[in-house]
């Protein structure tokens, strides 16, 4: 596996752990075993991501490795993911995370020259495609509405860049791909059947900027008048 700077290894690990939340491990296990073994498998995913990205093996305490090795299937899956070529369910998670992170130095250099708004849109698109970014569900930062795609603000922008999110939002608005209403870039949708609940954000009219195929509209939302 490739080597990378510590900060990128940690970012890769974060993305892998996010994807792990949507995967039942170990594969094919009963619900009881999935629940019982959830922590050790999550730890193995984290360790594999860090080691595979070039982090020093010394960062993993012996007690942690012993915990993984006590579960034969978990230990085998980790070894397969660290082998060349990497295989297995943990390797698949890391490959998905790496694809959305644009891990290679060349890719990072290319995208460092892009404007923040464009990088944000690409991050959303890749996250939606990989399943890392949820759509049309309670708490999601992206919702499809009748007139386009609602990007929840500031939530989605803070997930992209917790420190410079306002600058990212400002640059996105400067790209003029959003649809304003009454001079305001912020739009509001009420949540049906939930009194007082609403989502607020930026509306992007061009759905194809974020989706390869037309998504379904979230009928639980109704634009506030």
Image: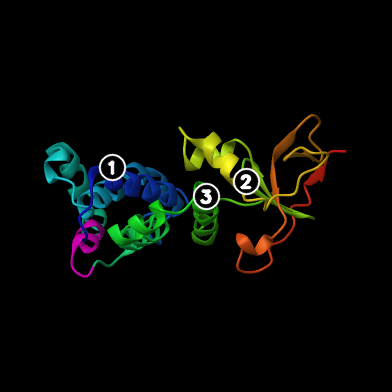
- Name the residue furthest top: 196
- Residue receiving disc 1: 7
Reply yes or no: does residue 58 show up in magenta: no
* Horizontal side, residue 61 vs residue 169: left or right: left
* Horizontal side, residue 200 vs residue 59: left or right: right
* Horizontal side, residue 28 vs residue 123: left or right: left
- Which tag, 1 or 2, sits closer to the chain's start? 1
- Camera-side mark, 3 or 2: 2
Look at 50% across and 59% down and name the residue there. Answer: 126
Look at 22% across and 59% down and name the residue there. Answer: 2
Residue 118 spot, x, y in % from top left: 53, 53
- Which tag, 1 or 3, sits closer to the chain's start? 1
- Which tag, 3 or 2, sits closer to the chain's start? 3
Look at 45% across and 32% down and name the residue there. Answer: 163
Q: Which residues are magenta?
A: 77-85
Query: Which SS type dominates the magenta stretch?
Result: helix
On screen, 65 above or below 27? above
Nearer to me, 192 or 69 = 192
- Residue receiving disc 3: 120
Q: Are marks 3 and 2 in contact (CB under 8 Å)?
A: no
On screen, 60 above or below 212? above
Q: Are marks 1 and 3 in contact (CB under 8 Å)?
A: no
Q: Report, in whole angstroms, how far the alpha carbon at label 3 lies from the one at label 2.
A: 13 Å
Residue 97 spot, x, y in % from top left: 38, 56
- Residue receiving disc 2: 174
Are there few (<14), some (14-19), or many (20+) residues within 10 Å of tag 2? few
Q: Report, in whole angstroms, how far the alpha carbon at label 1 lies from the one at label 3.
A: 19 Å
Nearer to me, 150 or 93 = 150
């Amino acid at each position: 596996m490739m080597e990378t700077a510590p900060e990128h290894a940690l970012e890769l690990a974060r993305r892998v752990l996010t994807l792990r939340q949507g995967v039942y491990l170990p594969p094919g296990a009963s619900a009881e075993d999935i629940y019982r073994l959830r922590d050790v498998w999550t730890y193995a995913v984290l360790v594999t991501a860090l080691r595979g990205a070039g982090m020093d093996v010394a960062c993993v305490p012996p007690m942690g490795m012993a915990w993984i090795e006590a579960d034969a299937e978990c230990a085998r899956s980790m070894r397969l993911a660290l082998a060349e070529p990497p295989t297995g369910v943990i390797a698949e998670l890391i490959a998905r995370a790496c694809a959305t992170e644009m891990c290679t130095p060349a890719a990072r250099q290319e995208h460092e020259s892009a404007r923040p708004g464009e990088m944000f849109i690409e991050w959303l698109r890749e996250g939606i495609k990989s399943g890392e970014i949820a759509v049309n569900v309670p708490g999601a930062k992206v919702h499809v509405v009748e007139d386009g795609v609602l990007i929840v603000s500031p939530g989605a922008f803070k997930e992209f860049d917790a420190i410079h999110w306002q600058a990212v939002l400002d640059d996105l608005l400067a790209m003029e791909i959003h649809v304003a209403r009454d001079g305001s870039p912020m739009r509001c949708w009420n949540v049906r059947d939930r009194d007082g609940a609403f989502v607020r954000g930026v509306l992007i009219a061009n759905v194809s900027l974020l989706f390869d195929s037309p998504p379904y509209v979230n009928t639980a939302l109704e634009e506030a008048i």
